[in-house]
Image (cartoon, coloured by chain):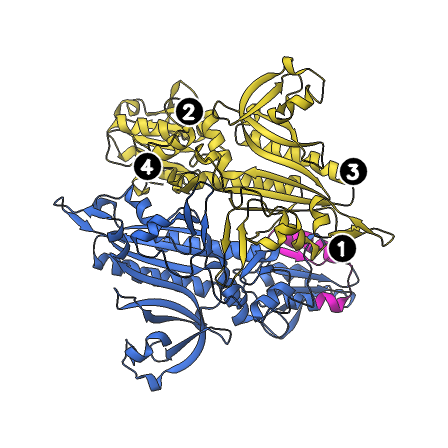
Chain colours: A yellow, B blue
Amino acid sequence: MRQSQLFTRTKRDFPKEEESKNAQLLIRGGFVCKEMAGVYSYLPLGLRIIRKIENIIRREMNETLGATEILMPALHPIEKYKKTKRENIDVLFHTESNTGGHFVLGQSHEEVVVPLVSNFVSSYRDLPLGVYQIQTKFRNEFRAKSGILRGKEFLMKDLYSFHTDEEDFDRYYKKAQIAYRNIFNEIGIGDKTYLTFASGGTFSKYSHEFQTVTDAGEDIIYLCSKCGVAINEEIIDEQKECPLCGLTKDKLEKIKSIEVANIFPLKTRFSDAFNLKYKNKKGEACPIIMGCYGIGVSRLMGAVVESLSDKNGMVWPESIAPFKVHIIPIDDNSVSEKIYTDLNKQMEVLYDDRDKGAGEKLKDADLIGIPYRIVVSPKTLENGCVEVKRRDKEQAELIKIEKIKSYVK
Amino acid sequence: MRQSQLFTRTKRDFPKEEESKNAQLLIRGGFVCKEMAGVYSYLPLGLRIIRKIENIIRREMNETLGATEILMPALHPIEKYKKTKRENIDVLFHTESNTGGHFVLGQSHEEVVVPLVSNFVSSYRDLPLGVYQIQTKFRNEFRAKSGILRGKEFLMKDLYSFHTDEEDFDRYYKKAQIAYRNIFNEIGIGDKTYLTFASGGTFSKYSHEFQTVTDAGEDIIYLCSKCGVAINEEIIDEQKECPLCGLTKDKLEKIKSIEVANIFPLKTRFSDAFNLKYKNKKGEACPIIMGCYGIGVSRLMGAVVESLSDKNGMVWPESIAPFKVHIIPIDDNSVSEKIYTDLNKQMEVLYDDRDKGAGEKLKDADLIGIPYRIVVSPKTLENGCVEVKRRDKEQAELIKIEKIKSYVK
């Protein structure tokens, strides 16, 4: 894509009330636009990243978990929440229809998915079942000041699984951890993201979060370096030690983090509320065991910015970068144009064809953070070369023009 | 895909209060699930269709119109609607935040896109500009009884264009009509869909709708068979004749239809409200001329069902069908399994591996409406053949197994 055709621009300033690093950088780079606290628009560069994150998640849901994608609505009738006694939770947005209906905006979809699934599931033969969606969620947040990390409106993948018994659920729950681990590894925050023991509510011992270590985190976790897992501060006083190796609280590392995902054994909490049962081989009606598995899509984009950016801007991993290569022509343009046309056939290239000085272009390239920067200048061309620099490395290299493709592949 | 892995099932019944043909068939086929009047979930078969419609629209927006995709939020601060004096329109859903904010749910995005674009557009060099999104809209409908044709919550593509002057706007507006025409042609309702003159509000002479002729329509249009355009009933009394050829009202055909899309010259109605201006070559600040262009994504799915189904079920055009081929094995399964595995590498195939009788499978195949049905039975195999029937044709043909691929290609 020609950068001149990108209607967004980098900016030096950002909304003054914006405190978070992720939103500051994403706004300055032209990835998002702030509508109000906790509500953002995704601009072309940002939307490309969102779509890539979605597709990585989608692949893991389909292939690792054999789950099926659906799309549920945001408007939910309050009556269903009365059945689960969640009609008064404070993060719900409420609205009313002109015909007297009282709806809430979905912040999670147990109240919708359980009645939906009950249309189709009746026998042990229909289980296990995993259905998920990638959809916009609404949370009536009291404070939404962490940029796209904690939004009033945000993109989320939520998966719900249905099982005949606890053993089958346990297998799926462990597979879900593998799928999530694959996702975090692929988007470049695997080494900073820890499976974290958290409260299981009133009906399960634990739930699990995936927490990414960063100074911007609003959560505190206690890290067990021996097991590579963590304990959320909310349960550390009752838990007191690593649930895996027994290392005591004082030996664990207290550290700030962001919750990027959450998996939760629901037992029969929601299937009971909607009387969702299956018939076993003997024809007896039995309760269905459920799990739910959330992952914040827009939040992941923010977590990557918090984790991987440096003082000059963002540093996108190739897997989710809006483009793979950023070509910066300096002075001479005919050769760079040719390199662009050629590379663009094989990979995603942003070509800075704007009428700007070298300094501004290089500064913008660092801010936008595309993995490979290729500078084409009269000086590099003297030896038939371009200068290639990876955004996550200090050193640039001179590469012969005919070698570019094999170098960036 | 193996049909046994599809968690949905066809049904004989559907919600009793559901009057519309589109929802009846889509619910019976397992394409959608009704949450409440005007609010539906999209199940795997339905979501596949939605994604294909989205991609056809996306391609036309990108390629024919050179527009750029973004994603704007559903929560809008009421303050912006006060600026455009739209805070009291009755189709808005309202909600309040825990911190005292008053929001409406987006039913259109002029109030969001104009301030957004004003961050980036300042010069004639930045124009023309077209930005669009495919996003969930909310309308506080008084009556939502036409299935997915008129929803409280629905998927829509909305495009907004920005221009230096009326001539430039006119060119774009005409190109948008071509893009829309391409979309309707590709999804199979082109021959039933008419460009329709409608009210331009208080500031434009006309807006234009695309109306698809069907008995399920809630609109009435007057068709000029000579020009292939129509006039919406709402303006027929003041318009009185075809705006193109002057044929008088009594010569026009009065007919029911569904509005599947709408394009609207906005002049400076919204750019003025937010003081969006550009600087011309002389450096003078000038008003920006706008247009908006909507198309109902989920509504299009409903319009196709209303237009193309028959008494046995749905009839999907290949371009948006959830699968291209539906393989129905009868009795013998080893050959059909091989045909499935083979075809599935090259195209989208649904394979009815369920343990059901031939009658039920064939009935379901008609209801689901996949373009090519391939029956593999001991009888067809006697001659090394399968029976191939197009869903939109009466006649089935016996085709040699080795010829299947070239036949359905």
- Between marks 3 and 4, how big is the CA–CA gap? 59 Å
* Residue displayed at 22% across by 59% down: B166
Query: How busy is the neighbourhood of tag 2: few (under 14 within 10 Å), some, or many (20 plus)?
Result: some
Query: Which residue does the numbered mark 1 point to in the structure image?
Result: A122
The residue singled out by tag 2 in the image is A390
Q: Is residue B360 left or right of residue B407?
A: right
Part of the protein shown in magenta: B336-362
Instruction: Say the numbered circle drawn on residue A167.
Output: 3
* Residue type beneath disc 1: Ser
| Residue A74 shows up from this direction | no
Counting from the top left corner in percent of width and height, residue A321 is at 45, 34
Counting residues from the start of the chain, the first of labels 4 and 2 encountered is 4
Q: CA distance from mark 1 to mark 3?
A: 19 Å
Which structural element holds mark 3? Answer: helix
The amino acid pointed to by label 3 is Glu
**Magenta stretch holds residue B352:** yes
Magenta region includes residue B66: no
What amino acid is at disc 4?
Lys
Q: Is residue B315 above or below residue A265?
A: below
**Mark 2: amino acid:** Arg
Element marked by disc 1: loop
Q: Nearer the viewer, residue B66 or B409?
A: B66
Question: What residue is disc 4 on?
Answer: A338
